[in-house]
Amino acid sequence: MSSGYLFTLWPNLPAAARIVKANRHYHEIYKGRECLSFKASHKSVFPGRLLSIGRQHGINDVILPENGQAQLQCSFYLVPSGELMLEDATTGHHTYIDWHDQYGKQEKYALQGDPRSRIIPQAGESVQIGIVFGQEISFQFKWRISIGSETVKKNLALIAQATIASNQGMTLTVPRDRNLDPTAYEARTVNTPNVPMEYTNKPLRQIHPYGKIGSGGFGNVFKAVDLRTGCIWAVKECINPKKEVLGENWKLAFKQEVEALAQLSHRNIIRLEHHQGWSLGRSVQIFFQLCKGSVHDLLPEDHQCF
């Protein structure tokens, strides 16, 4: 983050270019193009936010034109993990994330929930991220930080925590509907583990993997961000080894693993956080707190395994 900037919005359409020209305070020439650029340390006029966008002065940092735009369009803010959240402030679903990567357009990155929001994962130049307001205003979102840098992530987390602390007691995000859509939950099957209530009836989590931290005959373990909350997890993704379909008996071993983990509580055992993927056709995903080190760190320095 040598430039000090966190992200840049490049205009894709003439209406977006006019917004860039009208908001000179954030104007920058980046890679030969006029754009709007923002620092992680930016103090928004909207409490608790990094950046607020809309047509009403006094509550927005970037001002939109008067012709039909929302008084408050959307806002960006950092969550405690240092991830960046985009939240739609309109009631008509007029803010969108358009995510294109090597697999094409991906709907899981679209704004969801109420209010509609989504984490924008840190990604390199190969990923095209669009931020769209209505039908005429479209920007290309560009990260300006060193992707994958733990130092950068820690600094962002510190900024987020300081912002949250300075707004202690304020309600910054108010759900309009606390009842999630039934499709957000996974139906029980014969493969679903029998575990205490604290591990059941939780909505499905959609994740963005940041990298592989382990692998084995079961599949892989990823460092991943929850796109709804910004929490970082270690996710063990278990695959169908024989591509069997009927009954998916391969999930039995992972069902038993989750049932055993749910009964354990010890400071040297990584706690089970969540599990999903028991319905037909899904890979099993088991969520754990992300920790550093291994079992070897618990042994004396002179210990030798035979």
Image (tube, rainbow, N blue to C red):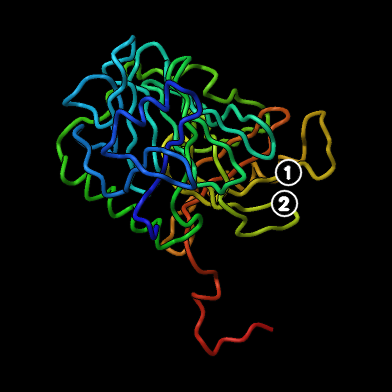
Q: Find residue 124 and name its label.
A: none
- At a point 47% along the width and 25% down the height, the residue shown is 138
Residue 155 at x, y = what percent?
A: 33, 58
Residue assigned mark 2: 218
Q: Nearer the viewer, residue 246 or 75?
A: 75
Q: Find residue 239 and name its label.
A: 1
Residue 17 at x, y = what percent?
A: 42, 28
Q: Residues within 10 Å of mark 1 (few under 14, many from 20)?
A: some
- CB contact under 8 Å: marks 2 and 1: yes
Q: Dividing the image into 4 quarters, which one contains the C terminus?
A: bottom right
Exactly how many numbered labels are in the figure?
2
- Compared with 6, 299 (above or below) is below
Instruction: Classify residue 256 by image quadrant.
Output: top right
Residue 229 horizontal side relative to residue 237, left or right = left
Instruction: Say which label, 2 or 1, has the lower sequence index.
Output: 2
Q: Nearer the viewer, residue 168 or 269?
A: 168
Dot 2: what SS?
Answer: loop
Residue 57 horizontal side relative to residue 284, left or right = left
Q: Is residue 74 visible?
A: yes
- Compared with 112, 257 (above or below) is below
Amino acid type of the residue tagged 2 in the rendering: Phe
Q: Is residue 262 visible?
A: no
- Compared with 115, 49 (above or below) is below
Residue 119 at x, y = what percent?
A: 44, 37
Amino acid type of the residue tagged 1 in the rendering: Ile
Instruction: Classify residue 284 by image quadrant.
Output: top right
